[in-house]
Amino acid sequence: MSRVLPATPDEVWRAWTEPDRLPHWFGPILKGVPGPDAEYVLEGRGAHGDTIVCRVLAWEPATRLRVTWRYTGETDSELRLDLAPTDDGTRLLLEHVGFGPEADPVDYAAGWHMYTDNLEAHLAGTPGVADSDARWMELMPVYAASAD
């Protein structure tokens, strides 16, 4: 997924890595703090107490972030973020790779689309997606069709 966001690479980086910024567009950090070689735990989606354990593999501020991503009940996958300045802000290239058989890449694609909508709104200082579950479900068939 690639999107130009209305902010500098440093602002986008901070939105991804600062504990007080993540809840505004993604969700809270339950344990740890993002940083070089760090491990931290994010609150997962849903009401089941799911978590996401992240271990930082690459930390290049305002440029590149790589983390292992282990959602409750899944094996490790890898989230890759690359940031590059553009005339209109920052190009975010987001790749989520290495899913185990228990993960649904279509679900992840729809989710990252919705969360990137929220991130874009956060960076622009506007409200994010009002009903994230509805938006997610709206995007699922779009990504399912493109996976075929």
Image: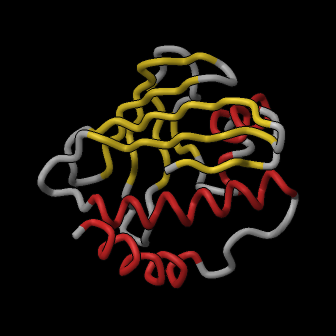
Q: Position of residue 18 (x, y in %)?
A: 70, 35
At x 24%, y 40%, the residue is 98
Q: Residue at x 41, y 20 (%)?
A: 57
Residue, x 77% and y 28% (percent of image)? 10
Give the quadrant of residue 117: bottom right
148 to the left or right of 16: left
Above or below 42: residue 111: below
Vertical placement of 25 versus 18: above or below?
A: below
In the depicted view, which residue is nearer to us: 112 or 20?
Answer: 112
Tell me if 103 is positioned left or right of 131 in this view. Answer: left
Q: Quadrant of the C terminus?
A: bottom left
Horizontal side of residue 23 vs 99, given as left or right: right
21 vs 99, nearest the viewer: 99
| Residue 94 percent across, percent down from the top left | 50, 43
How many badges with numbers are in the image? 0
Q: Residue furthest right?
A: 125
- Name the spot of residue 58 as percent of width and height, x first: 47, 18
In the depicted view, which residue is nearer to us: 64 or 85? 85
